Image (cartoon, rainbow, N blue to C red):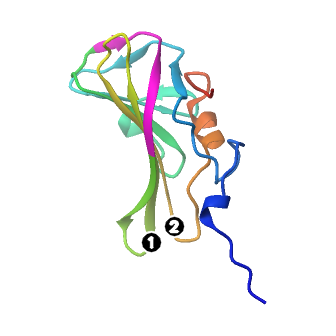
């Protein structure tokens, strides 16, 4: 006997689930000032700390907040609106290294030139994309998801 399951039924309201999707009316709170270094348009957070690009561990979840304008500058605390999200994978080195990612597109009511936050982690074919709860752990208290 066959049992068919619809992908549509695979939703969850638990951020610890791989089937959880961040609701569209969610926001992202930047809880600490974010420093954009000279010549960059982004900042990287890993293990709850603001780090330099060269210091990130690609095999652990790291999140990059992208802006339009180059630094040096400081982005003050703010709450951003989530406009859409995308999850995916792409090959870094086929057939051994995959990049798992979640892109969270954002907008600002204060005119801050934010584009999106990209969280990513390298793995292999037996690994999986990370959960939203795992993203939140990587962001620490630097950035917080707020669900409706």
Secondary structure under badge 1?
loop
Q: Which quadrant of the structure image shows residue 66?
A: top left
Q: Nearer the viewer, residue 30 or 94?
A: 30
Q: Magenta segment range? A: 73-85
Residue 52 spot, x, y in % from top left: 39, 31
Q: What label does residue 124 carry, if any?
A: 2
Residue placed under numbered mark 1 in the picture: 96
- Residue 70 can be seen, yes or no: yes
Q: Let me know if residue 140 is in the magenta part.
A: no
- Assess disc 1: are there few (<14), some (14-19) or many (≥20) residues with their C-alpha within 10 Å of its C-alpha: few
Where the C terminus falls, by quadrant? top right
Q: Is residue 140 left or right of residue 69?
A: right
Foreground residue, 25 or 90? 25
In the image, 125: left or right of 12? left
Instruction: Please tell me which residue lies in front, 31 or 109.
Output: 109
Establish if 125 lies above or below 147: below
Residue 106 lies, in percent from the top left, at: 40, 29
Label 2 near label 1: C-beta < 8 Å? Answer: yes
Picture coordinates of residue 136 (x, y %)? 61, 34
The secondary element bearing badge 2 is classed as: loop
């Amino acid at each position: 006997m066959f049992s068919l399951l619809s992908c549509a039924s695979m939703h969850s309201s638990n951020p610890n689930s791989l089937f959880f999707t961040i609701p569209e009316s969610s926001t992202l709170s930047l809880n600490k000032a974010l420093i954009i270094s000279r010549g960059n348009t982004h900042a990287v957070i890993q293990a709850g700390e603001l780090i330099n690009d060269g210091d990130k561990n690609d095999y652990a979840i790291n999140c990059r907040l992208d802006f339009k304008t180059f630094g040096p500058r400081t982005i003050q605390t703010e709450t951003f609106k989530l406009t859409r999200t995308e999850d995916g994978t792409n090959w870094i080195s086929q057939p051994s290294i995959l990049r798992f990612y979640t892109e969270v597109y954002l907008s600002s009511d204060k005119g801050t030139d934010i584009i999106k936050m990209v969280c990513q982690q390298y793995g292999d074919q037996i690994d999986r994309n990370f959960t939203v709860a795992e993203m939140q752990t990587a962001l620490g208290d630097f950035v917080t998801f707020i669900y409706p």
